[in-house]
Amino acid sequence: MVVLTCDTPEEEGITWTSDQSSEVLGSGKTLTIHVKEFGDAGRYTCHKGGEVLNQLFLLLHKKEDGIWSTDILKDPKEPKNKTFLKCEAKNYSGHFTCWWLTTISTDVKFSVKSSRGSSDPQGVTCGEATLSAERVKVEQKEYKKYSVQCQEDSACPTAEESLPVAVVLDAVHKLKYENYTRSFFIRDIIKPDPPKNLKLKPSKTPQQVEVSWEYPDTWSTPHSYFSLTFSVKVQGKRKNKTILVDETSATVTCHKGAKIHVQARDRYYNSSWSEWATVSCP
């Protein structure tokens, strides 16, 4: 049962209609609805003398076997965390991006809000959800990808995090409402951009080269404090070899036709590796 209240100073002569029925549903400042199915949801309007006083939109959040429905989004089925929202940060500035997948292309709306802490929440500002041109395939099925950019209002990159960031996504498809939540520390969602400016320099030893690179422009500074470690992989026709280094160069064996890949990760915290940057052996 749901009680709707007409937001008006008027007290008399008020009637109610809905977009699901042309009949007058009731009179008075409040309307009681017995909600049983999606046909009971929709837009409810209160009138007086042919004038619209107020409109209310009633959505349904379905519950089956004690579990709230999660039909609008696709679960990426990550190995360790079952989560519908994926969030990543390129650095410690307090800026992060969240994205999600859906097969629904019409009559769907998303809104995102976020904060850090619950008793005295600190502000996090999120923009509007946008549809990406990218299409993601999961198990031979194509999904649409939406994303949102968020920024912590008073972020301090060097401060130790004691309270997690909470993200709440409200999803509406036609008359169905669902919400999805994700909680995390920025340090846990760090994923740097790939190293930049990969260069090769011949070594004194035959078939060896010195590969060098630079920190990505988007990584936090100073680099002496926000340090990265690097994985260097030589991918040949028959075998691969990987080494880990803290410097921005390494000497590796580089046969013709092989490729050298370099990726980065926070040196002091076990967060995600960046995507690979690649250069071909001469």
Image (cartoon, grey):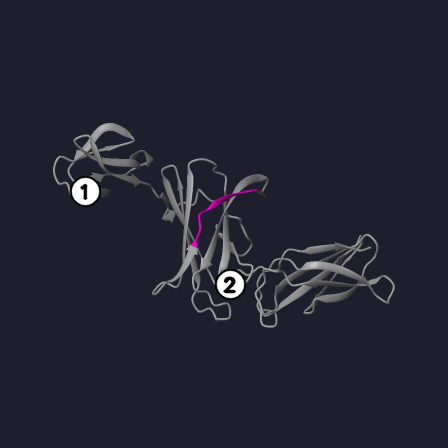
Nearest the eye: 139 or 177: 177
Amino acid type of disc 1? Thr
Rendering coords of residue 26 (x, y %): 18, 34
- Name the residue: 80% across, 55% down: 281
| Residue 186 position within the rendered picture, expressed as x and y whole percent measured from the top left | 50, 63
User: Which secondary structure, mark 2?
Assistant: loop
User: Where's residue 237, x and y in %?
Assistant: 80, 52
Q: Quadrant of residue 209?
A: bottom right
Residue 95 visible in the picture: yes
Give the magenta-colored segment's residue range.
126-134
Judged by its main secondary structure, the magenta piece is strand
Residue 127 x, y percent position in the rendering? 44, 51
244 sits left or right of 93 in the view: right
Measured in 3D between alpha carbons, the distance from the residue under mark 2 to the one under mark 1, in whole angstroms, is 45 Å
Vertically, is 41 above or below 239?
Answer: above
Specify the label residue 93 is tagged with.
2
Helix, strand or loop at mark 1: loop
Q: Residue furthest top?
A: 22
In this rendering, does residue 82 appear at all?
Answer: no
Q: Dot 2: few (<14), some (14–19), or many (≥20) neighbours within 10 Å?
A: some
Image quarter in which the C terminus is found: bottom right
Whether residue 22 is situated above or below residue 132 in the rendered picture = above
Residue 8 badge: 1
Q: Amino acid at mark 2?
A: Ser
